Image (tube, rainbow, N blue to C red):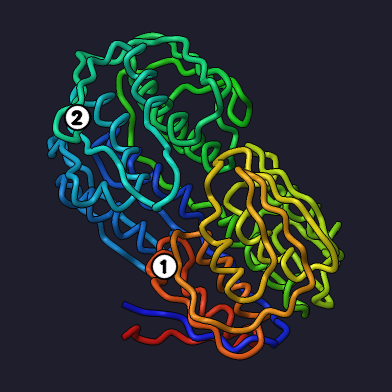
Amino acid sequence: MDKFVIHGGRPLEGTVEISGSKNATLPIMAAALLAPGRYSLTNVPNLRDVKTMANLLGQMGIRVDHGENALNLQVPEEHSLIAPYDLVRTMRASFYVLGPLLARHGQARVSLPGGCAWGPRPVNFHLEGLKKMGVEIEIDEGYVIGRCDRPKGARITFDVPSVGATGNLLMAATLAEGTTILENTAMEPEIQQLAEFLVAMGARISGIGGKRLEIVGVERLEPANIRIIPDRIEAGTFSAAVAMTGGDVTLQSVDTDHLSAVLAKLESAGADIQSTENSIRIQSNGRPDPVNVSTEVYPGFPTDMQAQWIALMSTAGGTSTIIDTIYHDRFAHVAELNRLGADIEVDGNVANVRGGARLKGASLMSTDLRASASLILAGLIAEGRTDVLRIYHIDRGYERIEVKLQSLGADIRREKQD
């Protein structure tokens, strides 16, 4: 098991390339199950979660060939319809295979998912939607077993927008009999790219980018190729790191439209931001102003930036309030940040941060992907040495984060953990 050893206090300078989006790659990999043939995916991040999805597809009989930030998938006419517990338990996104399997084969046996160790994130939206599409669902020994002749078109309204359920039902609807209307859907860029990929495969989808999707089922889809969009959360994390430590950094290969909410808050915190179509230059003196944040569904401030924002606000010159309206118990990082000397109190889904405390290095324990990022950011500003343990979490969603930070002048290295 590895850890990061960080010596803080260095401003960040230079240029860094942002990787492709993990959250776009995973459902697109699952979508390949909808049609036999060969697929080519480029700008794919080299991440633990992508490898997990590739291993899952491999166990199901799909050939996955890895290139440099690329994947080639060969999907046979017949393959296993079982997604086993040993892989699905490690990553919630594995559950994306359910919709495609039911759409193309009319049956599936998929383990209930696992993933980050925080908060109940039930799959009931997925299952209730599939039931409305005529799928018989039962739960047996931790597996979801689905059966149908062919999914039927239906009108489905989500109580709250769900990225996972939107993606799963969208894929199931592409081969359904009749028309499916999904209301109050997630609008994240990753869902938009999934829909665009499905259209490239021959799906009939209207309303892409909005809260209402209409899908007219087709008899057959064909393989397609795609370039994965940039990872907006990685870009947001590096932006917060510069605002926190000070310096002058240009982020390359980004989509600034996907980051509007985060960039607006960073500017309010005092960072100077200059954007082009595919790059962002961030300049900061490392003394952010306090700025309140409330997470919202896209295009609002993302919950996946909540932990990093709390780390940033711990160094601000005043008090700020961060409210997570998406996941009410996603605050395991707060106790670790307080070990560095931060002054943060949590009440329900609200974190009150009294900024300005001097952070001093300590040994910290990662609990999930974005919490790990917040601890690394705090370590970059803390006096002395900070050890961030259990960094297998960060490897799920950030490609070579320590190498990228080193290229910007950070004193961070990966070591074996005793």
Q: Residue 410 in the image: x percent, y percent?
A: 62, 85
Residue drawn 31% across the image and 86% down it: 418
Q: In screen coordinates, is 168 left or right of 208?
A: left
What residue type is disc 1 on?
Asp
Identify the residue at image location x=34%, y=23%: 127
Q: Quadrant of residue 392?
A: bottom left
> Which is in the foreground here, disc 1 or disc 2?
1
Query: Hey, which quadrant is residue 18 in on the image?
Result: bottom right
Count of number-bearing discs: 2
Q: Mark 2 is on which residue type?
A: Ala
Left or right of residue 298: residue 218? left
Residue at 75% x, 74% y is 357
The residue sitting at 63% across, 37% down in the picture is 297
The answer to whether the residues at label 1 and label 2 have Cβ atoms under 8 Å apart is: no
179 lies left or right of 212:
left
Label 1: few (<14), some or many (≥20) within 10 Å? some
Disc 2 marks which residue?
108
- Image quadrant assignment for residue 103: top left
Where residue 116 appears, as percent x and y from the top left, is 40, 52
Compare residues 337 and 292 and report the one nearer the observer.
Answer: 337
Quote the CA–CA distance across marks 1 and 2. 30 Å
